[in-house]
Amino acid sequence: MRVIEIFKELTKIPRCSGTYEPFINFIQNFAQQNNFSCEIDPMNNILCYKLNGKRAICLQSHYDIVCLEDGKVPELIESQGYLEAKDSTLGADNGIGCSYMLALMEQGIEAEYLFTSDEEIGLIGANNIQLQIEANKMLNLDSEMEGEICIGCAGGVDIFAMTAKGEYLKNIQKKDLYEISIENLDGGHSGVDIDKNIPNAIKLIAKSIKQCDGDLLDLQGGERINSIPKSAKAIIVSNSAPKQTHPNMKIEKSQQKTLHYKKLDPNIIDFLYIFANGVRGYDKEVGVVIDSINLATIKNTIDGVQIALSARSMQSDQLQSLTQETVMLLKVFGFEVSTSGKYPPWKPQKSSFVNEVFEIYKKDNPKVSVNAIHAGLECAILKQKYPQIEVCSIGPNIYFPHSNKERCEISSIGKVFEVVQKIVQKQNET
């Protein structure tokens, strides 16, 4: 299948968020070879189209991927009908969408092809886009469930907290030094996977420290702002040995004796321990998460201890309330707090374009449904930037994005591509 061949080519190109030049060079060469014009804005967004050709529909995907290790290029594995990667994220989110678009460009299909940057670190490319879109229909290819047409998504806010408090103490009680670590949890997407009861490594470490009344010396955990933490490590001193709070947890007692130590602010562990991480609101009737918050990362730096959280909601007022409550709680525990990366919810709304996509999709999959997703899609921002467009989103089966368990069903890639081709053909006929 040509789409998969293209995807395999893409996986060899460094595409971690914040890396642009290798992909841009690839697209420029690809566009030239296939007689497409290529525009690039200052935020590294890319728009390809045929000069004097039809621009009835815009196909859109982000090209950056979550890399759990900076700069790591996925090593692909085909196993039991799935594409996977060895010890890394796969990058099917959103590399498959990009591959669909490139396959259509290779066929000479006239449309606008929009590749956006830095979606995975705050939808930065979409938020600051400076390209002119002429189409009045947009098909986003960043959904992750075959047979579903997404017409709405959660909004989000990133919350950052810092405390530099700490004190140097004499080890009068001759407390023992321990290292607590936890690795290889499942991890996952902090939006679509937040209701799957995936353990949070930072919360597990905090629970162990709190239960043994340990003094915190160092704590590092989590991988990305939009991922459920799969690893964490802490160094503490305590009069009693910490207990495992998960089978993956390792606890090592040091033979080294410390006469003095810097005790970090105890409010750090108190906050982490009591913080209600995960789903905050759920609509049972439609079976969708309404509100959630993910304790994403913690870092001990020269300047102090930094905590990052990601709040999401399907409703603007609820997102504001959840953000304000979290900020207030952090301030009560003595943190300095800031927020960034805010993006709006995409309110579900049917349109003539959605109806067209539904009718086309239904011929291939009678069980196709229309829904909303508890994750951030660029559709919300792009709809605001380009009020004339009608938007919806589809994609193949991608499981556990943002984790080293990410995999994509090969048969699903082909089925969804057939639908994409028919949607574009329909728009070019009208």
Image: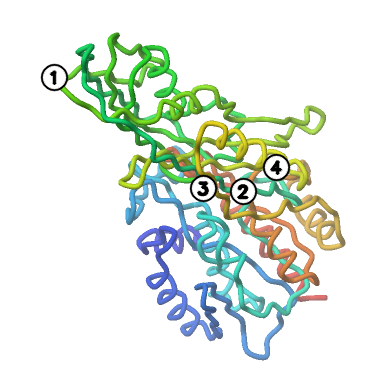
Q: Tell me the crowding category of disc 2: few under 14, some 14 to 19, or many 20 or more residues within 10 angstroms, Cα based.
A: many
Question: At numbered mark 1, what does the secondary structure look like: helix, strand or loop?
Answer: loop
Task: Identify the residue under disc 4.
Answer: 313
The percent coordinates of residue 78 (x first, y second) are 40, 45
Q: Residue at x 51, y 78 (%)?
A: 42
Earlier residue among tags 1 and 3: 1
Residue at the far top in the pictured view: 240
Is residue 404 at all visible to an observer of this figure?
Answer: no
Q: Tell me the crowding category of disc 4: few under 14, some 14 to 19, or many 20 or more residues within 10 angstroms, Cα based.
A: many
Earlier residue among tags 2 and 4: 2
The percent coordinates of residue 131 (x first, y second) are 62, 78
Task: Identify the residue under disc 3.
Answer: 410
The reply to whether the C-beta atoms of the residues labelled 1 and 3 are less than 8 Å apart is no
Tell me where residue 357 sits by quadrant. bottom right
| Inter-mark Cα distance, 2 to 3 | 34 Å
Task: Identify the residue under disc 2.
Answer: 157
The reply to whether the C-beta atoms of the residues labelled 2 and 1 are less than 8 Å apart is no
Image position of 166 (left or right of 27): left
Query: Mark 1 belongs to which amino acid?
Result: Lys
Question: At numbered mark 2, what does the secondary structure look like: helix, strand or loop?
Answer: strand
Residue at the far left in the pictured view: 256
